[in-house]
Amino acid sequence: KSHLKTYTVEEVGKHDNENDGIWVYYKEGVYDITKFVLKHPGGPEKIMMAAGGSIEPFWMIFANHNVSEIYQLLESMRIGNLDISKDSKKIEATEDPYANDPKRHKVLKVNGPKPFCGETPGPLLCESFLTPADTFYVRNHLPVPEIDIKDYELEIAIEDDTKKVINFENIKKYPKYTITTAIMCNASWSGARLTDVLADLKINEDDWKHVQFEGYDLDPSGVPYGGSIPISRALDPRADIILAYEMNGEPIPRDHGYPIRAIVPGVVGARNVKWLAKIVISNEESRSQFQRGDYKGFSPSVDWDTVDFSKSPAILDMPVTSAICTPTPGEIVKLKDGKIPVKGYAWSGGGKKIIRIDLTVDQGKTWHVAHQLIDDENAKEGRHWSWTLWSAEIPIDVDKNEVEVWVKAVDASYNVQPESFENIWNLRGLLCNAYHRVNVKVKK
Ligand code: MTE
Ligand code: MO
């Protein structure tokens, strides 16, 4: 890189517009991103926040940039080196925006520290029908907001027109309603029904298309996390959507949306907006990046050059899925009466009950049905939001020392999981609900 020109922070700063070119710096590199701005998957406005300056603080927030493909892409736009000598006023001290995130339970497997993304170990999942809040997976996209309950407000608007603002005490005055729903893990959530809170606005379902939710968590430009659901769903009391203030009978922990989050059962986690700040009745979907530029499905051959997020609908109901929790991959399992015990979970989106679990240890030549299924006994037809825990004992051939256990679930519409990931793979890796397969060693 020594042949490249050296620029000061001030010189880079002049290149913050299309006419002069758009430059940024990262550590000791200076980059001309003029041509890339319009192609930025997160939108041109987002990347323009860094124009003429350092992109480092933004990448601390949008930590999905911290992968080698993106560093390489950036390097391909390098035009020079940053003058890091003493008299060049370098980088405004960057404070860690995640410094006030809550402490997490050590058992969570950390997939990303900032924003925090942690998963519950498989064997723990099927230990209890309700996943304890402390070990419930966490999926944040931004720093966890700090909210003082005394100041908490939830604004409810029709388009730009604020109709009412309610505080935490007001929410508790609505009838309290509890549902059990799986958002990957399973918990019970209590709060006010969305239909009750919206009732006095006398909204006509035919006049509007979407209900948007906004969180208190903000990106560096002040844009909140957001998501939306169709109006028909939001106004349907049978959709069981609640503005929850309790998780498993306790106040919701900070990581899971304290003090209030939207619970939209049967629907992808992303629309279950935490730290709820605002509800907007609108003719438009949420403008959030997480509604329009993420959490969508694509054909397997679509790549980052050909993807058009505007052409795919936002994920709403989740497809049927299941997993084996025990044994774990590579585990040595002792045969009991010639069988191995297997346990796991299954659930489907849109309130569809799990009606059957099929298991095989011979690549599908013979299938065994799990006979013990535990789900929410009180769930009504078409409102099976919770997961189903299942267990089975599978007979193993005497000569086998190793087997691969496969599971697939069937829901009330007879939707079945696909056999392999290959033909459903998509560039975001979402909706990948192929059979779960676990290889285990057998001890006689
Ligand atoms: N709500 C806000 N405000 N901010 C977020 O980052 N993440 C969403 C959703 N709601 C998110 C949010 C996603 S993608 C998921 S999967 C769930 O919250 C995760 O909920 P949990 O962290 O309570 O498990
Ligand atoms: Mo998610």
Image (tube, rainbow, N blue to C red):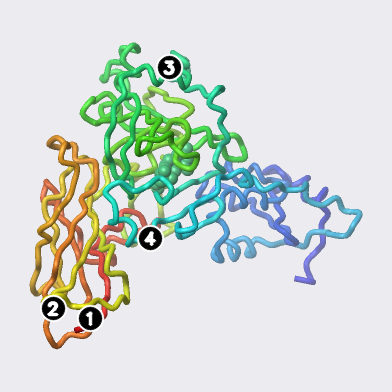
- Which image quarter holds the N terminus? bottom right
Lower position in the chain sequence, tag 3 or tag 2: 3
| Residue at numbered disc 1 | 442
Instruction: Tell me residue 117's x, y (percent).
Output: 48, 53
Residue plotted at (46% across, 17% down): 166
Under 8 Å from ligand 1: the CB of mark 1?
no
| Residue at numbered disc 3 | 170
Residue plotted at (45% across, 57% down): 108
In the rendered image, which quarter is residue 194 located in?
Answer: top left
Cα separation, mark 3 vs mark 2, equals 58 Å
Residue plotted at (25% across, 69% down): 437
> Callout 1 environment at 10 Å: few (<14), some (14 to 19), or many (20+)?
many
Under 8 Å from ligand 1: the CB of mark 3?
no
Q: Residue furthest right?
A: 87
Cα separation, mark 1 vs mark 3, equals 58 Å
**Pick the front one: 114 or 23:** 114
> Are dots 1 and 3 in contact, CB under 8 Å?
no
Residue 414 visible, this angle: yes
Cα separation, mark 2 vs mark 1, equals 9 Å
> Callout 3 environment at 10 Å: few (<14), some (14 to 19), or many (20+)?
few
Q: Quadrant of ligand 1?
A: top left
Looking at the picture, does residue 198 appear above or below residue 324?
above
Q: Amino acid at mark 2?
A: Ile
SS category of the residue bearing label 1:
strand
